[in-house]
Image (spheres, coloured by chain):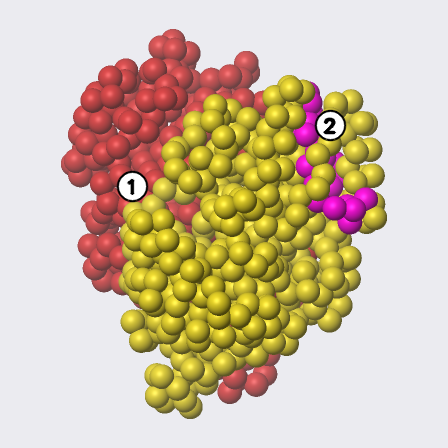
Chain colours: A yellow, B red
Amino acid sequence: MLNFDLHIPTRILFGRDTHKEIGTLLQPYAKKVLLHFGGSSVKKSGVYDAVTASLKESNMEFIELGGVVPNPRVSLVREGIALCRKEGVDLILAVGGGSVIDSAKAIAMGAYYDGDVWELYEQQNPITKALPVATILTIPAAGSESSNGTVVTNEEKQMKLGYGSIHLRPLLSVMNPELFFTLPKNQIANGVADMMSHIFERYFTNTVQTDLTDGLCETTLKTIMKNAMRVFSDAHDYDAWCQVGFGGTIAHNDLLGLGREQDWACHGMEHELSAIYDVAHGAGLAVLTPAWMQYVYKTNTNMFVQFAVNVMGVEDSYRDPDAIVMEGIARLRDFYKNMGLPSTLSELGIDESKLEVMAKKATGDAYGSEQPLGNLKKLYWQDVLEIYKLAK
Amino acid sequence: MLNFDLHIPTRILFGRDTHKEIGTLLQPYAKKVLLHFGGSSVKKSGVYDAVTASLKESNMEFIELGGVVPNPRVSLVREGIALCRKEGVDLILAVGGGSVIDSAKAIAMGAYYDGDVWELYEQQNPITKALPVATILTIPAAGSESSNGTVVTNEEKQMKLGYGSIHLRPLLSVMNPELFFTLPKNQIANGVADMMSHIFERYFTNTVQTDLTDGLCETTLKTIMKNAMRVFSDAHDYDAWCQVGFGGTIAHNDLLGLGREQDWACHGMEHELSAIYDVAHGAGLAVLTPAWMQYVYKTNTNMFVQFAVNVMGVEDSYRDPDAIVMEGIARLRDFYKNMGLPSTLSELGIDESKLEVMAKKATGDAYGSEQPLGNLKKLYWQDVLEIYKLAK
């Protein structure tokens, strides 16, 4: 096990009706709030009304910026930064899923940054402060509600990049699983694929002697998968949403990856799909993950056997390690399929024309700075291309 | 699952050599530190020298207060409070195990409290601030390094009471498992019994639909037990200590109990043993826990079957639920025994003379305010007496 530095100061209020307390919760921290959200769904669902009513009841001033789209755009972030400066906003309240929260975090750090905020994503210079961000989660998936990360898309450059800092961990996040009842099946499935991938990226490692985090990863994966099937068939299953929702939070708050070398190749490969084709992140991950497993597993067969047995429930009767692994991967594919997720790039509307371009962008070769993806097995652009082809 | 409010702002630095960075870590937060510790072991082990060297290197002023004993005394706490006020201390650095940390937390809140600090334990009035506490853990057991709690003993009153507040979560905690290499076997065993009990108190519940935290509890228990056997036979097994050490932290930082009604009867019953007989907390828990299980399991047989199967590995071939539970309890007793822990009160030097007195103190009857212990099954003083007798 490796040394680690863990710091998750985000407070989490979880359960029924918790979003109605947002005014009281934020009152000690802010005078003027930027209420940041996506499309009309928060208004239709009544969340917008409940939140604004609570803010008003606590006599909090707020202004609004809606319009965040999946794969959130840096153009809207820039607008938000200008607004925060002009209006003297001192806290950003993100009401939505990962895209809204990531956009809010980008605004939060951009408000204190002298240059253009996209430079932070490109140059990865450390920030020393950001506006506090609070969140009310309406789509469990990205884990951004307690993570230190933000991912945004530069639509002009067709680039999707991430940035991480302790200053981007939200001050507090509110999770009321009742707000997930209105999610359409494809958003449920995409979210589940995303949270599972957050665990896979941490779980598959060459670091040894990791019993505790192995077990935490495995039990969280199994819990999410089991309860995902329940909410997929009944989106009003509150208890199952509790498991999936909080599972998604710990999947990405760093706990499960402590002391482990992490991978992150699948996320790197997927960002290129989203950047060019604007596909849903979770759907892209569902396509790429089994292909990645198939391509890399021989680097550490034991780890993939452990996954197949402990997570996918492959029985001991499969004696051959390769057979065990392949059965585990097959079951994972089946799981994604049962959630209505795509299995191939072509189902995502991605043909072969840009596979090489994407592979070279993923590994930095397109920008003249080769940086192989992943840690379990280092992937160069030729490897990434092979994985894209396996996923065709 | 119940609503919850989770907030663990403690930063954790984990791994080899991390304690040598303490000066750099604390420098932004304090000018004058109270270095709080127990007996001579921190000096013998070299930890004291490493820590003071690091503080000096960062030009930090510090004063010292050693002498904390297991079941830490409120008399020393009072001394610490006076010292902090007189010397203008702005941070307390606890170097030790749970007793030292709990003593530090008591000083930290007492420094801002106008009355006698023991009143806080007796009256449970909420505090609004405390001095920041940092810790360097030398005995993994109590989980106090990231918990919100403190337990101290009033030696005059023969009372051991706890107090909890968000203001008592340490600012940061340093855990270098190499510092555990010199622990004697009995301290290892006591510590393991304590951390296991922290999970049991959260795990055994009547709350339903708790897949995620069930799984987190079970995997943490299994990891601790498996690796405890390793460190018990080789105290220099760094990798096994990593699992046990961090397992002990998450056992008591609240994560594993989220959204569950918790029990805490065993801790309540044990505090009476420690208060009068000054026994090691872990040893007391090892004696009482199996007796408690035996007494209460029929209130929720399913929960205890789940424990026996998922944690203690009892096979399906035991068809009768009672037999499964009894086998699970037997295996737990065996585990404690293999760790050299006592099985009976008499092994702790406790005879029958004060069982009724302790039972009535545990449930408040001795003070004229009956408050039954536990939640899985409410225990009145007569129940507690029965459990003490089962543990004779």
Front residue of this view, candidates B61 and A55:
A55
Q: What is the three-letter code of the residue carrying label 1?
A: Thr
Tell me the distance, in whole angstroms, between the alpha carbons under discs 1 and 2. 50 Å
Q: Position of residue A203 (x, y in %)?
A: 41, 62
Q: Chain of mark 1?
A: B
Q: Which region is colored magenta? A: A19-43
Q: Is residue A99 magenta?
A: no
Q: Position of residue A67 (x, y in %)?
A: 70, 42
Q: Is residue A28 magenta?
A: yes
For image coordinates 34% across by 83% down, the residue present is: A321
Residue occupied by mark 1: B138
For image coordinates 42% across by 47% down, the residue present is: B249
Q: Secondary structure at mark 2?
A: strand
Q: Position of residue B114 (x, y in %)?
A: 54, 14
Residue occupied by mark 2: A63
Mark on residue A167?
none
Front residue of this view, candidates B81 and B326:
B81
Asked if residue B2 lies left or right of residue A337, the reply is right
- Is disc 1 surrounded by few (<14), some (14 to 19) or many (20+) residues within 10 Å? many
Q: For marks 1 and 2, give the one nearer the viewer.
A: 2
Badge 1 vs badge 2, beta-carbon distance below 8 Å: no
Asked if residue A229 lies left or right of residue B88, the reply is right
Q: Chain of mark 2?
A: A
Q: Secondary structure at mark 1?
A: loop
For image coordinates 41% across by 89% down, the residue present is: A318
